[in-house]
Amino acid sequence: MLDGLNWLLDPAHWSGSRGIPTRLLEHLAITGLTLLIAGVIALAAGLAIGHTRRGRGLVVGLSGALRAMPTLGLLVFIAVQFGFGVRLAIIPTLIVLVVLAIPPILAGAYAGVESVDPATVDASRALGLTEWQILWRVEFPLALPLIVGGLRSAMLQVVATATVAAYISLGGLGRFLFDALPLRDYPQMLAGAILVAALALILDLLFLLVGKAVLPAGVRATRGTRRSKTPTERTAA
Amino acid sequence: MSWLFENFSDVWALAVTHVALSVPPILLGLIISVPLGWFAHRYRWGRGTLLTIAGLLYTIPSLALIIAMPTILGTQILDPINLIAALTLYAVALLVRTAADAFDQVSPQVLDAATALGYGPWRRFWQVQFPLAAPIIIAGTRVVSSSTVSLVTLGALVGMSGLGYLFTDGTQRSFPFEIGVGIVGTVLIALIFDLIIVLIGKALLPWSRTRRVRAKTNAETLEVTTNA
Amino acid sequence: MIEFDGISKRFPDGTLAVDNFSLRLPSREITVFVGSSGSGKTTLLRMINRMVEPTSGRILIDDEDVAQLNPVTLRRRIGYVMQNSGLLPHRTVLQNIATVPLLNRVPRAEAVARARELMDTVGLDAAFANRYPAELSGGQQQRVGVARGLAVNPNILLMDEPFGAVDPIVRRELQEELLRLQQELAKTIVFVTHDIDEAFLLGDHVTILARGGQIAQHGTPDEILSNPASEFVADFIGADRGRRALTLRESNGRTLVVDGTGRIAGVLGAETATGPVSVGAGGRDEHLGEITLGTEAAEAPHEVAPAVNDAPTASGVPEVDTPR
């Protein structure tokens, strides 16, 4: 562990195109870009599924199937099969990372919308809110904590898998692992591992704070008090 | 295709290794998580501590964990123990929360009734509390099983055996078919594991099936009325 | 005026919730739909603002077919109050009340001022303005719900079991408050409940619904109580038992009114009412309004004389105290 820390503290490793800051920025850029693309796709789909209550089976099936899919295999398969090779490694990497990030964001969005009390939505509709207004003014703000939660677990997966993606010669913190592996340079590998873990922990904390910040004040007040039960009459009438 | 026939015994051997590397983390994870989950369910302070640690563990990228293992355990870099230990930690990180939730949702009235009937604490746990928490724990185990089988392939990146070897070897030889065999093989193992867990669950918990059906019916009734 | 014209509703699962229902609801009065679950009363109510679309038939509001109107525009003209208030949990009381006016682009200051007025109208302390729904009691939430329903100054107010989830004491307060409000505002109110006492207390007109939206009887509370149209209605309103089966009994020269459970409901023919007598429990009817049979509560005798066999039966029509 000490060797890894020593490697980290060596000023020589903090500059240049193979230095820690560069690799860190690369890693963040890949993660951010992935979350942006996956977020747009998955939020749109997830909110639609949550609002219409259609296509839930799709989400469950999709995330179940993807869980068993080895991302490393998918990554190298796309890279080799479609000849992106090592020069355009960003394309297979983004494809795999986006595919990986979609299910948790999708699930967060749809579960978030679904968690909104049906009576609240019903009342909003009866009040004369349009479906669009119901989605953005009622369901979305109330779903935000779970949406951020979905983004958070997607982020964790992406940070981890972006490390693996360095295997096909892309930048990012994973490079420290794969550059050091053939040289049996264990301190550098360890340093890479520490950096990736630290990045994940910091980003996780960040998302945690954002998640707390977006919890609507009125919902915070609900915590601890018992929620009113849905009337059974409504189901029958 | 002919590649597969020619190399079938090699692929089979890799698959067997893959299974051998996947099973211990799943089983160990389950054995460790259930008592920890019960503890987190039972004691408030235990819950906070355990679930925070589990959350932190889960945050650490798996590859980093695998690489850090030799330092922690004092093992060699290529020792499969590293992979098994790292994936076990992962499994625990995921399952502790699930197990705690599973024990939480067992109705206290049922436990009260069992106590009133004269169950001792030990028998009450094994004959009432655990069976009622089991469906959720089994669902969690299915998740852990799938992700473990998939994560074992990462071992190939640091030179370990298993179907992940087909990924690294296939990349070096620019041979997508070999990679494809590795993907299909991994998914197949995951599916077989999933099926086995489902079958064990059905055998052990014959009542949980009817319960799920009823829950689904309720959800559908609600759906009809909210759509109206 | 709201008019149901041959309305039927079959749900996707095949159940026929309403079968060929026709009725006119007069303006500026309270009509109560009462029935047990499965009578289609909520379905009928929700068809007025197109929350539920009828399978066949028309609904007219002032001779205008609602099916021709944009549902959103229609709903913004109609107040709606539901059982568990349906308030937006992430908005304050004031924001909740002002929701629809703000959607209708009423200037913010004006909408807020109107919301504050409405809080006063429904008897909510101004201090609650910036609280969140979760910080209010059930009764207070319902008041906010009523204020929100009135925010666009609608001619029509739909109330779907609005007091069903609050405790009996608060429910009674809210019922009285509604009657007071109605005296001031004179809205066309359609009120749904499964509680026959609430129906008789609030309704200018009461529609008793049997399964599938069949009208078992429609009329004023007086008409229904004095002349139940069928065995079903008599049984539903409990005219021949419990607290509604009143008999007269002579005791010490005064005429006592005794209900079916043997309790003294009041004294007949007394000059002044010093206070309404609350009638005690009788089966499920625990919250009937006050009975004004002119009781002098202080002098009401406690000892009951032996029952007089040939005592005339009061025809089961307590005059319900509806201050309007």
Image (cartoon, coloured by chain):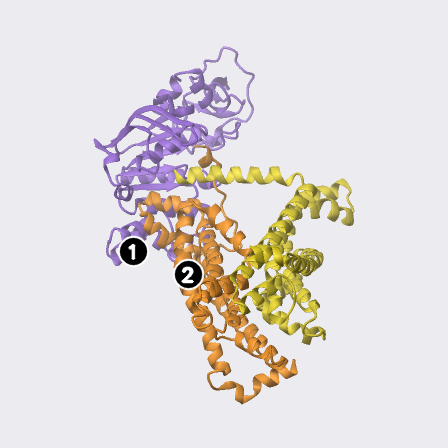
Q: Amino acid at mark 1?
A: Val
Q: Which chain is yellow?
A: B
On what subunit does the disc labeled 2 rest?
Answer: A
Give C110 or B220, whichever is nearer the viewer.
B220
Q: Which residue is mark 1?
A: C112
Examine the rendering and report whether any part of residue A166 can be seen.
yes
On what subunit does the disc labeled 1 rest?
Answer: C
Question: Split into 4 quadrants, where in the image is the N terminus of chain C?
Answer: top left
**Percent x, y for residue B125?**
73, 49
Residue at point 45% right, 40% down?
B223
Q: Amino acid at mark 2?
A: Gly
Residue at point 54% right, 57% down?
A69
Give C94 or C105, whichever is nearer the viewer.
C105
Name the disc covering residue C34, or none: none
Q: Which residue is mark 2?
A: A39
Instruction: Say whether residue B107 is left or right of residue A103.
Output: right
Above or below for B51 versus B78: above
Q: Colour of chain A?
A: orange
Q: Which residue appears farthest toward the bottom when viewing the image?
A: A11
Give B13 or C230, whichever is nearer the viewer.
B13
**Percent x, y for residue C305?**
55, 19
Instruction: Say whether residue C26 is left or right of residue A204.
Output: left
Labels 1 and 2 in the same subunit: no
